[in-house]
Amino acid sequence: MNEQTKAQVEAYAEEYRTEQLELLRTLGKMPAPTRKEDFRAAFCRDWLRAQGAENVRIDGAKNVICKLGPDTEELVVFAAHTDIVFPDVENLPLREEGGKLFAPGIGDDTANLVNLLMAAKYLIQKQTALEYGVLVVANACEEGLGNLDGTKALFAKYGTRIQGFYSFDIYMPLCCSSAVGSYRYKITCKTPGGHSYANFGDPSAIQLLCGLVNELYQIQPPVRSRTTYNVGRIEGGTTVNSIAQQASMLYEFRSTAQDCLEEMEEKFRRAVAHWNGRGGDFEVELLGIRPGNGPVDQKKLGQFTAKSKEIVRTFTGREPDETPNSTDSNIPLSLGIPANTIGTIDGGSAHTRQEWVDIASLPTGLKIVLGLMLEYQKNDCF
């Protein structure tokens, strides 16, 4: 980034810091449960139109898509997700104290969304000449069992026309270029059950499910990429004197490599098959898939990420954190498309109702987003 562009970015962030904070206070109160992002999506669409955007719409997946720049075949995406992890459908509680804003989802991902919108405002109102078509996307369904469905829908439509993808999520100085994929299941075991005394010795759904759990924990995960697994919840049975007729568990495995995820799936299916029919019937429900890294050209990804890291260093003065994460960037990375997930806020207590963001960090985050967008100015893009 040249000094002139840097100065423009810094001046804009300073000039609009009050508007930026007011936008966060407004959006921070808006409920946006996963798959119920309608209210937030409509607000973002209308806000972008009010700034002068002419090509903005909400698609069938509840993504807000704002098209800027020329009608090139190649596209670059800048995105932040609208949904939060909490189920509230009424206004969220928001308070300000000690230079911080507190609210459920305020940092993940509301503040990042605000920085995306404010940077888009610059491009819209300055009518910045861009080298490629740019999609500014406020996407749905990032959290939990949303399974990244908003971003999946985006790539189902635009596919490999998208040459680069930036997701603004989590905290500074994150600059992640590696996806942690996951497969998630609910496994249920059913048996005839019976009385604990009269039918003693008959199969128990809990006993059989525990047998499966034990076998799952004997699985040796692949070591070529970090791979993990976990049983996170078990429930079942009715009373202390009843042989359990039904028991279920939630199980997941994770890896940065898609081939490791597929290997784990094979081992998981074999374990279930081993226990099925041994006194009980097992049912497997796939709750969601987040793909891991696919066939990405590492040289191309490295060059793409180097630009992002430079922007993060320039405006934060900190060394980027490259820890792999599970975010919307999983989808392009699984398809071999360069992608980064970048934090644009300082805060803490994510995924709790006490989540907070540091108000003073907002302008820095806006500089990161706008600085990345301006890498695609005509005659100044890589």
Image: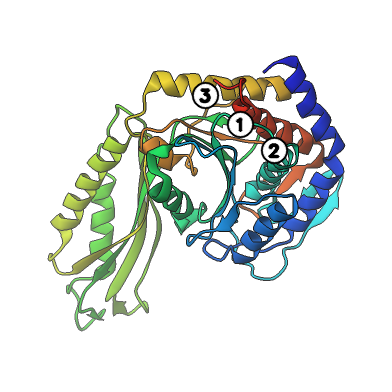
Residue that numbered label 1 is attached to: 130
- Tell me which label, 2 or 3, sits earlier in the chain: 2
Residue depth check, mark 3 versus mark 1: number of the one nearer the observer: 1
Q: Nearer the viewer, residue 102 or 39?
A: 39
Question: Residue 27's x, y, as percent?
Answer: 73, 56
The residue that appears at 36% across and 43% down in the rendered structure is 291
Position of 161 with respect to 357 (left or right) is left
Q: Nearer the viewer, residue 194 or 96?
A: 96
The residue that appears at 79% across and 45% down in the rendered structure is 20
**Displayed quadrant of residue 98:** top right
Number of residue marks: 3
Position of 99 with respect to 270 (left or right) is right
Residue that numbered label 3 is attached to: 305
Position of 46 with respect to 36 (left or right) is right
- Tell me which label, 2 or 1, sits earlier in the chain: 2
Question: Residue 113's x, y, as percent?
Answer: 66, 47
Q: Is residue 348 visible?
A: no
Q: The residue tagged with tag 3: helix, strand or loop?
A: helix
Residue flagged by tag 3: what amino acid is it?
Thr
Question: Residue 227's x, y, as percent?
Answer: 35, 36
